[in-house]
Amino acid sequence: MVPDSFTGYFTAAATAAGALIGLLFVVASLRPEAVMGTGASARARAVAGSAFTALVNSFFVSLIALIPETNLGYTAVIMAVISLYGTFRLHRGLGRGEPAVLQLTLALAAYLTQLVTGTLLILSPGHQSLVYVIAYVLVASFAAALTRAWSLMQGRHTPKPPETRNA
């Protein structure tokens, strides 16, 4: 069970995640050909998809945490599994030299931490320190999602044009 002292936090987190998901859609709609269109690079799709996955994960974990008497562990485990699957699927086409590999590593660390913590919460629902771990994982997910969304907005996901030499 989630202690009542977390109600404000999870309310704010669910609200922020919902708003940020909406803003991510705006970013994608401003640059559809470069972010999600058929001509978009695998890196662009991975960055956008990773940001979306992190925000959806944060949204549902926070939203379910607000339901009284709910064991947050089940939601944390389910969302971690969904997020891990989505993350692997989005990043499988990237080469090892891609900067998104670091994003993959950080996402995997966050979702695996969430998975383990959620499992522990299922086994020990009254363990308040585990709720803190989930709360901090959500903060990390927000930070990662915002970094990815910002890179989309700046166009850092697109390949740089080759430099031309003056003869």
Image (tube, rainbow, N blue to C red):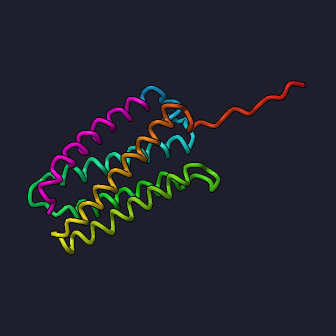
**Front residue (pair 151, 91):** 151
Is residue 48 highlighted in magenta? Answer: no
Above or below for 31 versus 141: above
The x and y percentages for residue 7 are 15, 50
Quadrant housing the N terminus: bottom left
Which stretch did the figure color magenta?
A: 1-28
Q: Which residue is drawn at 47% across and 58% down?
A: 88
Q: How many marks?
A: 0
| Location of residue 137 by image quarter | bottom left
- Left or right relative to 133: residue 36: right
**Front residue (pair 147, 4):** 4
**Front residue (pair 90, 128):** 128
Above or below for 107 versus 73: above
The x and y percentages for residue 81 are 35, 62
- Left or right relative to 80: residue 91: right
Quick one: which residue is furthest to the bottom in this view? 123
Q: Which residue is drawn at 23% across and 40% down?
A: 15
Q: Residue at x 36, y 46 (%)?
A: 142
The x and y percentages for residue 96 are 62, 56
